[in-house]
Image: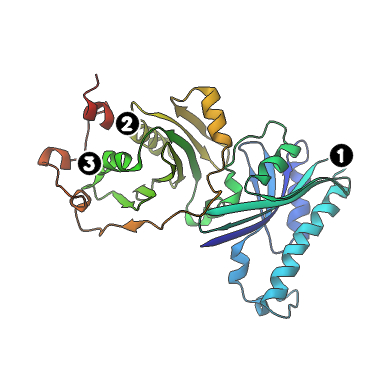
Amino acid sequence: MSYITYNIIVKVENNRDTLIDNLTKNLKYQYVHEFFTPFHGVICQTNDNLREIPFDRFKEELFNNEADKIDKVENQLRNYSIELSKSFTDTDIAFINVDCFGGKCSSNGFVVRNGQKTYENDGHHSAHIDILKRISADYSGWHFYPFTRNFYSRKAGVKGGITGDIVNFTLPAIWMSFNIDFGNNPSYDIAVAENELLVEKINFFEFYFMKIDENWLKVLGTLFDDSAENLADMENTITEHLAGLEYQIQFDLFDGSFQKKIGTLPNELGFEIHQRSYRYKAFNERPIPFHPTENNIQQTSSKQDETTEKVSDNKKGFFYRFFGRK
């Protein structure tokens, strides 16, 4: 599956309202959103949703065919970034193209100021980091929420995102932890493949664990319920099932009203891992969902006894229990 986006990104200083007004009035086919992490900014994006609209459905502009539609709209965004910089003088404005396919992502783009390009990157799996640092000096991290589908899925009930890392542990062990506690719980869906694990509390939140290499698991996820009760439940769920492990997890509501980071990784190591690209090669397999009416635990080669099939209320955490830690 591919996902291609073209983006104008501006850091918000004292220009929020005029910036959003300008982009909304002058770019008819793009999404304009404010974001609050990892810095406060505004993004104007064309993404794959445009491809779902037939070229002859655009009443205000005539396109010859689908290719003509895509080319003109995408070039419109690229070109307008330069015009925008002339209106917002002395402001660094980024244009970034992100192309993801089969789990592998690359990006390219430039920074423009007062109508002149001040930096350009022709393409790399981490090019967006270098570009974003030009408009926000303290920017860090490979993951950027506005480059994900979920960021533009608020009408579908998406309220926020989850991102993080686990080191020196294996994906099957993480699956075992969640499956023992929630395998028989109808409020949860669990799906697993060779390199991926999806744990979803239906209508509330989901965790997606992705094996990058033998020593690193990437954690991503989605928040569907922004109530205080759900945020507390989500945090308790992840801390219980990662107790005793080396990890860092951050929760964010997209409206900027909530952000929290938890974990055990030392700051220096956590920062270093946060910078790494986890989309530098295609390796992912689509999750293979278990049959919803079957006991997830029975998908393994051996059954657990009756005590492990019940939803756990032991707050010490699976790995404390498994290894007999006190």
Within-10-Å neighbours for mark 2: few <14, some 14–19, many 20+ = some
The residue carrying mark 3 is: 180
Comparing labels 3 and 1, the label whose residue is closer to the camera: 3
Residue type for callout 3:
Ile
Q: Nearer the viewer, residue 274 or 54?
A: 274
Tag 1 or tag 2, which sits nearer the N-term? 1
Rounded to the nearest angstrom, the CA distance separating label 3 from label 1 is: 56 Å
Q: Is residue 75 left or right of residue 210?
A: right
Tag 1 or tag 3, which sits nearer the N-term? 1
Give the SS element for disc 3: helix
Within-10-Å neighbours for mark 1: few <14, some 14–19, many 20+ = few
The residue carrying mark 1 is: 90
Residue type for callout 1:
Asp
Q: Nearer the viewer, residue 207 or 299?
A: 299
Quadrant in the rendering for residue 254: top right
Within-10-Å neighbours for mark 3: few <14, some 14–19, many 20+ = many
Residue type for callout 2:
Glu
Rounded to the nearest angstrom, the CA distance separating label 2 from label 1 is: 48 Å
Give the SS element for disc 1: loop
| Circle number at residue 240 | 2
Q: Is residue 172 left or right of residue 44?
A: left
Q: Residue at x 61, y 69 (%)?
A: 51
